[in-house]
Amino acid sequence: MSDRRRPTDPSSATPPKPLPAEVLCHSCDPETLDFEHTGELADLDGVLGQERALEALRFGIGMLHEGYNLFVLGSTGLGRRTLVNRLFRDAAAKRDVPKDWCYVNDFETPHRPRALRLPAGRGHALRRDMQQLTEDVITALVAAFQSEAYRSQAQEIHDELKDRDEQAFGELRQKAEKRNVALLRTPGGYTLAPTHDGEILGAEEFEKLPERDQQAIETAVEELKQDLRQLIAQIPRWQREGRERHKQLDLQVSGATVDQQFEELYQEYSDLPEVLRFFDAVRHDLLENAEQIRSLGEDSDSGPNPAGQAARQLTRYQVNVLVDHAQTTGAPVFYEDNPTYQNLVGRVEHTVQHGTLVTDFTLIKSGALARANGGYLIIDAERLLGHSFAWEALKRALRARELRVESLETMLSIASTTTLEPEPIPLDLKVVLVGGRRLYYLLQYYDPEFARLFKVAADFSEDMQRDTDSTGQYARLIGMQQRAGGLRPFSRAGVARVIDQAARHVEDGERLSLHMGSLDDLLREADYYAGQDNAVHVGDTHVESAIDAGIRRLSRIREQVHETIRRGIQRVDLEGERVGQVNGLSVISLGEFSFGRPSRITATARLGAGKVIDIEREVELGGAIHSKGVLILSSYLAWRYSTDQPLSLAASLTFEQSYGPVEGDSASVAELCALLSALADAPMRQSLAVTGSVDQHGVVQAIGGVNEKIEGFFDVCAARGLDGSHGVIIPASNRPHLMLRRDVVEAAREGRFHVYAVTHVDQAGALLSGLPAGEPDPEGRWPEPSLNGRVQARLAELARLRQAYSRREDPHASE
């Protein structure tokens, strides 16, 4: 047999002894701290433990090339936002104030408003000036068209047209009278009628005329009808000539009036060519629509400001100030708390007119990208990705280096209302995304554009190395936060207890948490309990009270879970032995509070085709990682016991009385031990619980939540009474992570509770079953009295049974 099937460490087959109480909690000794209380300590000079992130942030601020946007990694509460805001505001104060941006009407293509860039503060001035200009033009046009000079010229044109009309019809009437025909004007136009001696004849009278006279009159009427048609055909041409003369007069009067109003504006904005071109377009449109504008002014001739009322209806001459930096100092630093598509890109609003949704350029609203243009935009990455289309919109803007204010309806081609296509605005800003590490790496992996657009990663450390120097620095951090919060000084013992809790927070006795939010909460709550005692300094008992109170506030569910176990509703055996049953340990996380709980893991084994069924997975309660752990168990059995024969078992594994999702591989050691117990028909001790992951070679690997798991099983056992047989088996690689409660450590010191650290599943199996793991001979056969020997024998028996059944089903099969 290959040595690969033997434990890596020869001692890994030997059951370990319980860990000494001293290694169950890596406590900080107050005597190692060289101060009496934090009032004696100076503030830190920099940011503790975040040197890497600080360097990246400064690099990102200084790199002005395309694509060097930042992604700030880390969990909530590390002080990322505080540091980012401080650094970027310092950098922004040294930069110039960016330009104002406005949207104005494009009179040739109104659905495509034009963007104007103006010096800071002048956008607001332009809007005010255009509003005043519109009011002044309306007032001046009304006055000009009501003047005596204009009326006299207009009346002259009207009289000339009327005289021409009357003269032409008078000549035709005289011609008709000479031929005994009258030209009559009726409500429907003109008509011709026969006459005799100046009198109009009726039908009967006309019939009495001699036939010769009748024919002469009829001939004359037909000829005159032709003349009348020709004359009437000329009337529209005369009217057009009159209207054109009126138009020229109106244009002359309007031009003089409008030019007078624009004269001052042209001088004031002479340094802005784009604004001057806008003025030209406005002037041209004003002249073309002078009559309509004048009518508005005349119709609004009531109220305190009739011109202002009329001007509000002429929105096409207004200026929509999208971004106003009149009050801005330096470059903007903008944080978008709700990064929806509209809040990021902007939006085009609509109003209801006559039951229809309509819009214009004045309803274009700015988003975060426009407001932060020329500076820095900070966004929570998770919130950004949580809003539909926002992430794609941000990437499109950064990629194109321009901002297109486009409604979602237009983008998705589902708009059924009038919409706009505003001119894009050039973008020059740096975007800072703040998010978690998992999100960062998911974006790196799944989004090929992410790495090109966010080239700077500022990774905030969750913890720092715990040594003599860092402990002293952490004490100074505690003092600095205590003074910043206006709290009582912490005694040396109080600081030591806070440091222990910082290690417990990261589940590692050799590291310290850099989670500023949790640290500040603990300091404030400990100060509260010191105040209850009227203490001058915050001591370790106050810190302990704060920790215990925080747990108590959140532990109702834990107490209910433990009560169901104590009452036997949730069955957990804590004494005796069972075949195919092992106590596994899991962690339930409820927000910021987590606790451990034991669960019965059971296994059955029978003849089959080598498949280990994960019942949790079959009913879709098991996660992918848990299912991977179960598959590893099958691989381990085949590797260790059946390399030269088919694995001929069908096994089932499940968490008994589990009614929710099961995820993670930390129960794989317990599952493997339950499976080995079922195969070997070897009872397992129920006074022990097991946690740990296992690889395909049986090596036990570290898991998370080791402290919560140990304490959870301890609490259940303590409720029923500790008798010295209870304990927990953990991976040896989790020893540095042990930061157990004081009562657990004391119980271990007194021998009432035990913690075993194992490196191989053989050790866990030996502890649980009381059987030796055994050593295989050169042929790979394990001794029968050993746990592995009994497993191997059972698997060999199942293989023979499978072969026998195969022959029975296929009598022609070759032997």
Image (tube, rainbow, N blue to C red):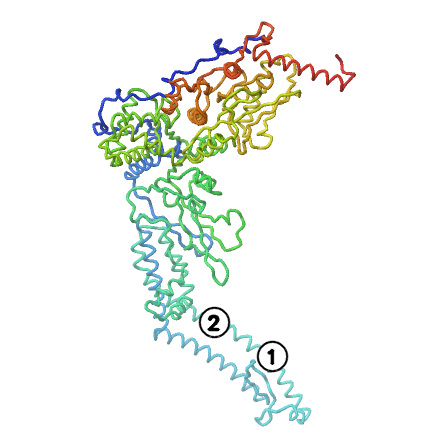
Residue 36 found in image quarter? top left
Cβ atoms under marks 2 and 1 closer than 8 Å: no
Sequence-first tag of 2 and 1:
1
117 or 712: nearer the viewer? 712
Q: Which residue is farthest left?
A: 40
Q: Which residue is mark 2?
A: 241
Describe the element under mark 1 as helix, strand or loop.
Answer: helix
> Within 10 angstroms of label 1, few (less than 14), some, or many (20 or more) residues?
few
Tell me where residue 742 appears, x and y as whole percent: 36, 24
In the image, what residue occupies the spot 50% across and 60% down?
356
Q: Which residue is farthest top?
A: 778
Q: Which residue is mark 1?
A: 226
Residue 654 found in image quarter? top right
Describe the element under mark 2 as helix, strand or loop.
Answer: helix
Name the kind of residue labelled 1 in the image.
Answer: Gln
The N terminus, quarter of image: top right
Tell me where residue 702 appears, x and y as whole percent: 46, 21
Tell me where residue 755 appears, x and y as whole percent: 43, 19
Residue 130 in view in this figure: yes
> Within 10 angstroms of label 2, few (less than 14), some, or many (20 or more) residues?
some
